[in-house]
Amino acid sequence: MDADYWALIYCFIIILAFLRFTEFLADSKTLSSSSCRKVVHVLTGIIYLLCWPLYSDADSARYICSIVPIVVTLRFALIGLGKDPTPPI
């Protein structure tokens, strides 16, 4: 498998683990849901940017890399529409 696909998998694992952790913090009332939303909005982009060095300089890497924010955005859109795609913890 191409190294960029491995980078995509690693980036997804890191971002989804972070999102699940913030869901846990909200569910356990450690942070308010408002604070968790703010944390998610700020740190998701930073985590994504920190994953960029995992990708190669190949032309296809930019397209592979763009899959992560597209999927995360679609997930947030579904949650906003009341159709949470995430199975319960």
Image (spheres, rainbow, N blue to C red):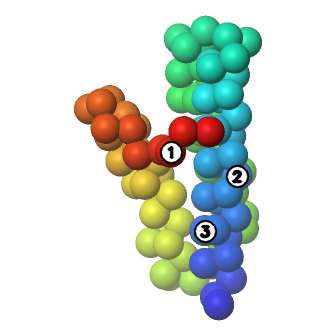
Identify the disc placed on residue 87. Answer: 1
Residue 45 shows in this picture: yes
Tell me the CA gap for discs 2 and 1.
18 Å
Q: Is residue 81 above or below residue 29?
A: below
Q: Along the line of sight, which residue is nearer the eye, 84 or 71?
A: 84
Tell me the CA gap for discs 2 and 3.
10 Å
Nearer the viewer's eye, disc 3 or disc 1?
A: 1
Percent from the top left, x then y, of residue 18?
68, 40
Q: Mark 1 packing: few (<14 Cα in 10 Å), some, or many (20+)?
A: few
Q: Earlier in the sequence, mark 2 or mark 3?
A: 3
Give, as a three-letter code, the residue at label 3.
Leu
| Residue at horizontal 62 percent and vertical 48 percent from the top | 16
Look at the numbered discs 2 and 3 and tell me whether their residues touch, using CB distance below 8 Å.
no
Q: Earlier in the sequence, mark 2 or mark 1?
A: 2
Residue 56 shows in this picture: no
Percent from the top left, x then y, of residue 31?
68, 12
Task: Determine the secondary structure under disc 3.
Answer: helix
Task: Determine the secondary structure under disc 1.
Answer: loop
